[in-house]
Image (spheres, rainbow, N blue to C red):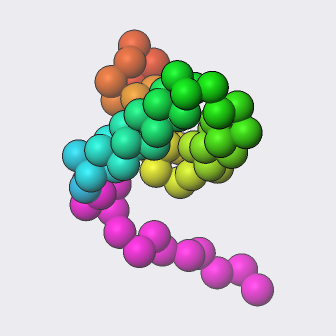
Amino acid sequence: MNTVLEPMYGWNDINWRKLERSVHKLQKRIFQASNRGNVKLVRRLQKLLISSRTARLLAVRRVTQENKGSAT
């Protein structure tokens, strides 16, 4: 079956401020756990950050729009 799936929302419809806030909060939790010396929690939160869709979207946005790689 060859069907093209349409995205549920457009690139410009994404609430970027909300995504930035949620990723920043997670990074803050990682920093605080690191300061407390809780290695197990730090690793778990890092894993969560890497697999999160919001962090991935922000990374793609940085590369394609904000950095010099925007010509790509």
Secondary structure mostly seen in magenta is loop
- Residue 40 horizontal/vertical position (percent): 73, 39
Q: Quadrant of residue 66?
A: top left
Farthest front residue in view: 36
In this rendering, the answer to whether 36 lies above or below 48 is above
Q: Is residue 55 visible?
A: yes
Depth check: 54 or 6 in front?
Answer: 54
Q: Is residue 5 located in the magenta-colored stretch of the structure? A: yes
Q: Is residue 2 above or below residue 14?
A: below
Q: Is residue 54 left or right of residue 5?
A: left
Residue found at the very far bottom of the displayed protein: 1
**Residue 58 visible in the displayed image:** no
Q: Residue furthest top?
A: 68
Give x and y (percent) for residue 3.
Answer: 64, 81
The quarter holding residue 45 reads: top right
State the image coordinates of residue 16 (x, y, percent, origin top left).
Answer: 27, 47
**Residue span colored magenta:** 1-14
Front-lying residue, 68 or 22 = 22
Viewport quadrant of the N terminus: bottom right
Residue nearest the observer in this picture, 13 or 45: 45
Given residues 13 and 39, the one toward you in this image is 39
The residue at the point 55 percent across, 27 percent down is 36
Please tell me whether residue 69 belongs to the stretch shown in magenta: no
Residue at figure coordinates x 34%, y 29% from the top left: 65
The residue under the point 34% across, 54% down is: 11
